[in-house]
């Protein structure tokens, strides 16, 4: 197909007109036009610990001015980034290193009832014991109830009472009151800092097969996340000469 000069000019005009639209007497660009710029940036190094994050800055193998041009950003309890100041025509920030908590580290399954033995194992392996907390209380309360064919639970929404009717050896001899809120420190953030202590609702029940089950429900509204951020920031400020925000 052979286009004449008039047809080509018409097409060119249509293309030009498509870059702008009129709305209420105002002209708007219909294209998001930006200059084509190539501003190379280094690929971020990924580490799994705060120790690795600190080591990268202390060694400074690239001889960078960390103190004046970089900031450590505590994004959440599981992630910290080292960001540069604004640079280039695009005014973009460069991330040199990411510290992200190892995803293979196990965490306690809150809000989920589990068999008595599994609960005790996870309690001992996934919590940090601290003086004055309720770790020993929870471990004792859950372990002292043996498997039973029937267990009565009275729950008024604040406290819970449990009475084991069969299998008396080592069980509660009378109806016992369970402390409704317990204070524990599960592993949920970087291991270099003390794990934030939180409040949890402890619940015990007997399953259809008569086996004792226990669960912990989070009861602090996520306040531990802010505490973790502040503790991470304090750790970094102590170990590196870089501005830290959390």
Image: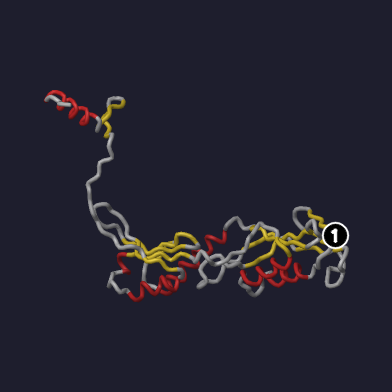
**Quadrant position of the C terminus in the picture:** bottom left
Judge by depth and name the residue closer to the eye, 88 or 61.
61
Crowdedness near tag 1: few (<14), some (14–19) or many (≥20) residues, C-alpha within 10 Å: some
Task: Please state the horizontal and vertical placement of residue 55, each as a whole percent of the image.
Answer: 39, 75
Seen in the picture, residue 14 relative to 90 is either above or below; the reply is above
Seen in the picture, residue 177 relative to 170 is either above or below; the reply is above
Task: Give the residue displayed 80% in from the left and 59% down from the top.
Answer: 209
Judge by depth and name the residue closer to the eye, 45 or 94.
45
Q: Is residue 84 left or right of residue 140?
A: left
Question: Is label 1 in a helix, a strand or a loop?
Answer: loop
Task: Give the residue displayed 41% in from the left and 70% down from the top.
Answer: 53
Residue with the most extreme front position: 1
Task: Please state the horizontal and vertical placement of residue 238, each as a whole percent of the image.
Answer: 43, 74
Judge by depth and name the residue closer to the eye, 104 or 64.
104
Judge by depth and name the residue closer to the eye, 4 or 237.
4
Q: Which residue is mark 1?
A: 150
Task: Give the residue displayed 80% in from the left and 67% down from the top.
Answer: 145
Q: Is residue 33 left or right of residue 188?
A: left
Q: Is residue 13 left or right of residue 234?
A: left
């Amino acid at each position: 197909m052979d286009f004449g000069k008039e047809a080509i000019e018409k097409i060119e005009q249509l293309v030009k007109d498509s870059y702008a639209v009129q709305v209420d007497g105002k002209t708007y660009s219909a294209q998001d036009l930006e200059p084509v710029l190539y501003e190379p940036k280094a690929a971020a190094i990924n580490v799994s610990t705060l120790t690795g994050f600190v080591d990268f800055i202390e060694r400074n193998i690239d001889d960078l001015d960390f103190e004046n041009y970089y900031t450590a950003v505590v994004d959440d309890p599981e992630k910290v980034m080292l960001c540069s100041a604004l640079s280039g025509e695009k005014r973009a920030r460069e991330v040199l290193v990411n510290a992200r908590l190892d995803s293979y580290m196990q965490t306690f399954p809150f809000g989920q009832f589990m068999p008595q033995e599994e609960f005790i194992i996870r309690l001992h392996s996934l919590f940090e014991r601290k003086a004055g907390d309720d770790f020993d209380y929870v471990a004792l309360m859950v372990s002292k109830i043996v498997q039973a064919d029937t267990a009565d639970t009275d729950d008024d929404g604040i406290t819970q009472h449990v009475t084991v009717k069969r299998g008396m050896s080592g069980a509660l001899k009378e109806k016992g009151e369970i402390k409704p809120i317990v204070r524990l420190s599960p592993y949920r953030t970087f291991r270099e800092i003390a794990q934030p202590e939180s409040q949890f609702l402890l619940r015990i029940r007997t399953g259809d097969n008569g086996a004792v089950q226990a669960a912990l429900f989070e009861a602090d509204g996520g306040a531990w996340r802010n505490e973790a951020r502040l503790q991470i920031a304090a750790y970094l400020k102590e170990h590196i000469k870089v501005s830290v925000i959390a």
